[in-house]
């Protein structure tokens, strides 16, 4: 009973997090501004419901029985079409379905994160390319996991064969192919996804006390990796309770995956909550700045920067201090590294480059943008030492 309560509680909390995410995105961009990840995450929530139901059935309806953990003599003693026989057959089928649902949720969340990162890195060179590589890696690894789940045991009905012993690879509750392939590919993909935002966050020129909570928001995959390893170990050492233990840890890992992947999206509410309890300094840029280096702007990023600077100039303000991270944030609908209404105290500095836009004159050709840096560039691209 306690295990069932835990599973349904985790499901409810995960769905609440998804609903909060939808609320935040609705408030920021409206339903017309929803992107692919805004649909993938609710879909992952729906599949989580199915996974939880499957995990419940294994323990509640089929007594946690599968075609695993049976000695040869016990297999021969099981009467075909008896209650135990039927429970073991049905439990094994649920295990195959549960593994497929488990993989579907994890990879839906990974794809949603990759889409989110594609918006976060808009306008920066190299990083968007790494996101595109992530799509390829996720597609290949998802296909590999599905093929391993479906083709590792042939004929397919041997997955729920009772007698004779179908072999370990045809026992879904403890199949080494299932455990090793899914766990390894899950860890590899999570590590690659971590490699996209963390270098950017670590190298931006902001105070360490602001950098740490931001990195924490994006480091949730580390908890998913830990849960995945624990699940694999529990399946291997749980013995006859392996089916129930595996289902329980699948729900836990799924819950962790959904929650931590949505933290960067719902961080405006987190920021607001910290502000109410007097901890807003965790998200402020006050304090000593750490050294950082810049990510070069792409052509799209430079165009966005020039467009934004021109809008500010037309309002009578100087376009100073616009940084590459701000171009990325303003070029999309995300406000992770900068506040939604940037001020001089909230701007994150990625490089020492300062952009200045001269006043537009309709009677003459526009003047080239001047960049103040250790070297001065003229309109022809010639370098003059300062």
Image (cartoon, rainbow, N blue to C red):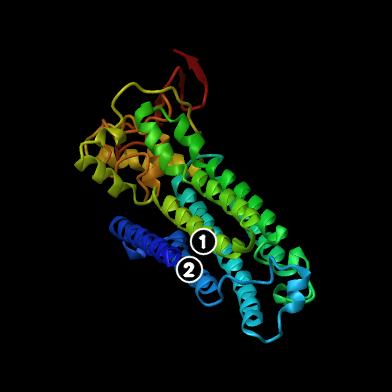
Foreground mark, 2 or 1, reads 1
Judge by depth and name the residue closer to the eye, 112 or 212.
212
Task: Tell me which numbered mark, 2 or 1, is placed earlier along the sequence.
Answer: 2
* Nearer to the camera, 326 or 261: 261
What quarter of the picture does the C terminus occupy?
A: top left
Spatial separation of the CA atoms under disc 2 and disc 1: 9 Å
Inspect this view and state whether residue 166 appears: no
Circle 1 residues within 10 Å: few <14, some 14–19, many ≥20 = many
Drawn side of residue 302 relative to residue 132, left or right:
left
What secondary structure is marked by label 1?
Answer: helix
Q: At 45% across and 39% down in the image, what residue appears? A: 302
Which residue is labeled 2 in the image?
52
Which residue is at a point 35% across and 29% down the rendered structure image? 209
Q: Position of residue 331 (x, y in %)?
A: 39, 47
Q: Is residue 193 left or right of residue 11?
A: right
Residue occupying the point 28% across, 58% down: 27
- The foreground one among 233 and 30 is 233
Dots 2, 1 in contact, CB < 8 A: no
Residue 179 image position (x, y, % from top left): 66, 57
Would residue 222 be found to the left or right of residue 239 on screen? Answer: left
Q: Which residue is mark 1?
A: 248
- Dot label at residue 112: none
Instruction: Measuring from the top left, give residue 50's x and y in whole percent.
Output: 49, 72
Local secondary structure at mark 2: helix
| Image quarter of the N terminus | bottom left
């Amino acid at each position: 009973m306690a295990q069932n309560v835990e599973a349904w509680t985790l499901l409810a909390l995960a769905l609440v997090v998804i609903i909060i995410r939808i609320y935040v995105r609705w408030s920021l961009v409206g339903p017309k501004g929803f992107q692919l990840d805004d649909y993938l995450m609710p879909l992952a929530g729906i599949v989580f419901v199915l996974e939880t139901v499957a995990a419940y059935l294994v323990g509640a309806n089929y007594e946690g029985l599968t075609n695993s953990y049976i000695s040869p003599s016990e297999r021969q003693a099981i009467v075909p079409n008896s209650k135990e026989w039927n429970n073991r057959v049905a439990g094994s089928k649920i295990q195959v379905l549960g593994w497929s649902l488990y993989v579907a949720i994890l990879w839906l969340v990974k794809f949603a994160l990759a889409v989110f990162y594609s918006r976060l890195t808009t306008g920066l060179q190299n990083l968007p390319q790494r996101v595109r590589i992530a799509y390829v890696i996720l597609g290949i690894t998802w296909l590999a996991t599905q093929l391993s789940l479906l083709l590792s045991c042939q004929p397919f009905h041997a997955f729920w064969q009772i007698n004779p012993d179908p072999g370990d690879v045809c026992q879904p509750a403890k199949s080494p192919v299932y455990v090793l392939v899914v766990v390894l590919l899950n860890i590899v993909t999570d590590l690659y996804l971590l490699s996209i935002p963390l270098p950017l966050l670590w190298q931006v020129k902001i105070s360490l006390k602001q950098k740490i909570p931001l990195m924490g928001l994006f480091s949730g995959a580390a908890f998913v990796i830990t849960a995945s390893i624990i699940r694999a170990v529990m399946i291997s050492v749980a013995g006859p309770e392996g089916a129930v233990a595996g289902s329980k840890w699948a729900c836990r890992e799924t819950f962790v995956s959904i929650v931590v992947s949505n933290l960067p999206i719902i961080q405006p509410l987190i920021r607001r909550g910290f502000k109410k309890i007097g901890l807003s300094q965790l998200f402020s840029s006050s304090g000593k700045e750490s050294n950082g280096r810049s990510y070069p702007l792409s052509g799209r990023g430079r165009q966005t920067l020039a467009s934004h600077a021109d809008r500010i100039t037309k309002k009578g303000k100087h376009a100073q201090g616009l940084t590459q991270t701000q171009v990325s944030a303003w070029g999309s609908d995300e406000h992770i590294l900068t506040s939604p209404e940037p001020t001089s105290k909230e701007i994150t500095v990625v490089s020492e480059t300062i952009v200045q836009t001269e006043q537009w004159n309709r009677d003459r050709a526009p003047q080239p943008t001047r960049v103040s840096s250790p070297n001065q560039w003229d309109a022809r691209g010639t370098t003059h030492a300062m």
